[in-house]
Image: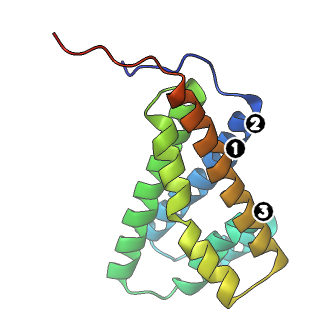
Amino acid sequence: MAPRTAEPPSLLIKLLVIKKMLFGGVMLAVSVMAALGWGYHDQVVAFADSYLLNPEYGLVRWVVEHLANAKPQVLGQVAALTGVYGLLIESAAVGLWLGFVWAEPLFIALVTVLLPLEMAEVLHHPSPSKVLLLVINLAIVVILTTHWLRGRSHEPPMAPAP
């Protein structure tokens, strides 16, 4: 079993984890939709417009709208990439929730990896919701990185191997 941190995650970190778990679930849904095909494109777009109110889910709407007529190989790549990312973010979120030491750096890396895409989106197609999303994700990275580094500085040094 993987080692756990000394103290459970704070309420703020749990809230951040829940937010990203929802996003990871949406990424998994996109993966499944891409893998199964786009025969129900109109229904998927209607669902995205009706239920995905958070600006972060605009990415899902964009994927649905722009890849509806994509070639099967492209849909396969989308399914693989979104599926892997969704599984990784879900695993890291659950691990962080449970206090596993490996989860926090993985979670930070997974949130950080999308920041350049979000920055490019803000630069090319600025909107208040996109700017807000970027600020929220930057705050998540700063909060978690600070928490992780603070926790590492309080860890006792590892004993040398015999």
In screen coordinates, is 31 left or right of 115? left
Q: With respect to residue 141, does 53 lie above or below? A: below
Question: Quadrant of the rendered structure where residue 16 is?
Answer: top right
Q: Residue at x 69, y 72 (%)?
A: 58
| Mark sitting on residue 54 | 3
How far apart, in angstroms, are the residues tagged by discs 1 and 2?
6 Å
Residue that numbered label 1 is attached to: 16
Q: Position of residue 55 (x, y in %)?
A: 76, 68
The residue lying toward the viewer, choosing from 65 and 120, is 120
Q: Residues within 10 Å of mark 1 (few under 14, many from 20)?
A: some
Q: Residue at x 43, y 34 (%)?
A: 102
Q: Looking at the figure, which quarter contains the N terminus?
A: top left
Q: How is the image coloured?
A: rainbow
Sooner in the amino-acid sequence: mark 3 or mark 1: 1
Question: Quadrant of the rendered structure where residue 119 is?
Answer: bottom right
Q: Amino acid at mark 2?
A: Leu
Q: Amino acid at mark 1?
A: Leu
Residue farthest along the top direction in this orientation: 162
Q: Residue at x 47, y 60 (%)?
A: 32
Residue that numbered label 2 is attached to: 12
Q: Position of residue 98 (x, y in %)?
A: 56, 25
Q: Residue at x 58, y 51 (%)?
A: 25
Dot 3: element: loop
Q: Position of residue 47 (x, y in %)?
A: 72, 67
Dot 1: element: helix
Q: Amino acid at mark 3?
A: Asn
Between marks 3 and 1 in the image, the one whose residue lies nearer the viewer: 1
The residue lying toward the viewer, choosing from 94 and 31, is 94
